[in-house]
């Protein structure tokens, strides 16, 4: 790959992103910085096709980038400019930095990305494992029927309906609330083990028989929170995209957790994943993802899913900006929480 081929590949990708039409040698010759004849461009484009960076959809048409062409373009050829102050202000207006919980912050960023990119946003939240239990509450809802609520410091709320063998008295309900507050408030979710639950049950004494199902339900909810949750928003943008097969979109939405393995990859900064390369449900697609952090540790992933023909130079700075914004806000919030806890 000499410099001329690189320039021609960059010109093809830029032109295709802009027009959506296969790119011919004439269009490439009119791009800035291309100072060779159309015949030379045709030869170089043929070589780029042999190398797997371009493909020709029809014999009489121009060429379009392959995912390998996009990868090389993003890694070595794409030019991105830092966001201007005006662009940052515009993004801040679309983002609710005063959202009350971490989940709300991330969803606000996801909503802004769907509006900006006309793609779908993907969120993978793994931060509950670093969260602590802030409240356990049980609510009577009917005869021997109770709803258990588990609330964490990250703002996550899980509930479970429990059907008991006995109706609980006010004394039993009060004991359970106080017992949970004394023994579980401030406990990190990942530290809540089966052994710890067994010890809590044994220490309840005369209340053990009636309250054991509720204590066990707390453990079940904690395991649910520790599981990775994939949230997709802006699905209608995928369904309205002419470059996608509608059946593939429906399958993807129904099996969205299948992309968790791609989001688990260890990386820093921006990561671009192509559907054709990684064989997730949508062909001709790409996913631009960035991890956000909390206290220096990965807390989740934020990104967008759209067609391969995306304006990467424009969209990547948006994803970077929001992921960094979330990192700053939730890390500051964690410091505030720890400061309060020390008082």
Image (tube, rainbow, N blue to C red):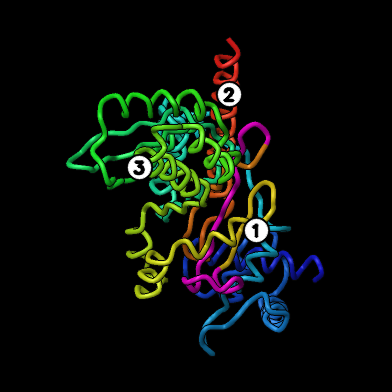
Q: Where does residue 160 sit, x and y in percent of width and height? A: 34, 45
Q: Secondary structure at mark 2?
A: helix
Q: Secondary structure at mark 1?
A: loop
- 280, 238: nearer the viewer: 280
- 100, 16: nearer the viewer: 100
Q: Which residue is mark 3?
A: 159
Q: Which residue is mark 2?
A: 332
* Residue 302 seen: no
The disc, 1 or 3, on the residue closer to the chain's N-terminal end is 1
- 196, 110: nearer the viewer: 196
Q: Identify the residue at the far right of this view.
A: 2
Q: Where does residue 316 sit, x and y in percent of width and height? A: 57, 49
Q: Image point 40% across, 49% down: which residue?
A: 114
Q: Image point 54% across, 26% down: which residue?
A: 186
Q: Where does residue 164 sit, x and y in percent of width and height? A: 28, 45
Give the distance between the C-alpha atoms of the residues marked 1 and 2, in whole angstroms: 45 Å
- 51 in the magenta segment: no
Q: Where does residue 13 sit, x and y in percent of width and height? A: 60, 65
On-image quarter of the C terminus: top right
* Residue 213 seen: yes
Magenta part of the protein: which range? 275-296
Q: Is residue 280 above or below residue 157?
A: below
């Amino acid at each position: 790959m000499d410099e001329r081929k690189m320039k021609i590949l960059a010109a093809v990708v830029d032109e295709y992103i802009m027009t959506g039409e296969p790119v011919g040698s004439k269009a490439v010759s009119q791009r800035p910085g291309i100072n060779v004849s159309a015949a030379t461009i045709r030869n170089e484009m043929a070589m780029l096709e042999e190398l797997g960076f371009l493909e020709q959809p029809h014999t009489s048409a121009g060429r379009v980038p392959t995912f390998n062409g996009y990868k090389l373009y993003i890694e070595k050829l794409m030019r991105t400019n830092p966001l201007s102050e005006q662009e940052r202000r515009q993004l801040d207006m679309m983002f609710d930095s005063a959202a009350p919980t971490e989940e709300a912050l991330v969803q606000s960023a996801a909503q802004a990305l769907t509006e900006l990119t006309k793609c779908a946003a993907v969120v993978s939240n793994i931060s509950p494992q670093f969260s602590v239990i802030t409240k356990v509450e049980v609510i009577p809802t009917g005869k021997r029927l109770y709803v258990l609520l588990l609330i964490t410091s990250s703002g996550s709320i899980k509930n479970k309906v429990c059907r008991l063998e006995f109706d609980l008295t006010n004394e039993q309900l009060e004991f359970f609330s106080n017992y949970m507050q004394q023994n579980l408030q401030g406990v990190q979710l990942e530290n809540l083990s089966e052994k710890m639950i067994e010890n809590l049950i044994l220490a309840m004494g005369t209340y053990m028989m009636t309250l054991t199902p509720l204590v066990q339900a707390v453990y079940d909810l904690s395991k649910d929170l520790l599981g990775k949750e994939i949230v997709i928003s802006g699905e209608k943008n995928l369904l309205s995209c002419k470059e996608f097969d509608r059946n593939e979109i429906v399958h993807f939405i129904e099996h969205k957790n299948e992309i968790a393995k791609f989001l688990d990859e260890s990386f820093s900064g921006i990561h671009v994943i192509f559907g054709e390369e990684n064989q997730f449900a949508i062909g001709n697609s790409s996913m631009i993802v960035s991890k956000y952090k909390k206290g220096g540790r990965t807390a989740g992933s934020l990104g967008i899913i759209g067609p391969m023909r995306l304006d990467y130079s424009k969209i990547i700075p948006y994803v970077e900006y929001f992921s960094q914004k979330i990192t700053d806000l939730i890390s500051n919030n964690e410091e505030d929480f720890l400061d309060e806890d020390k008082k």
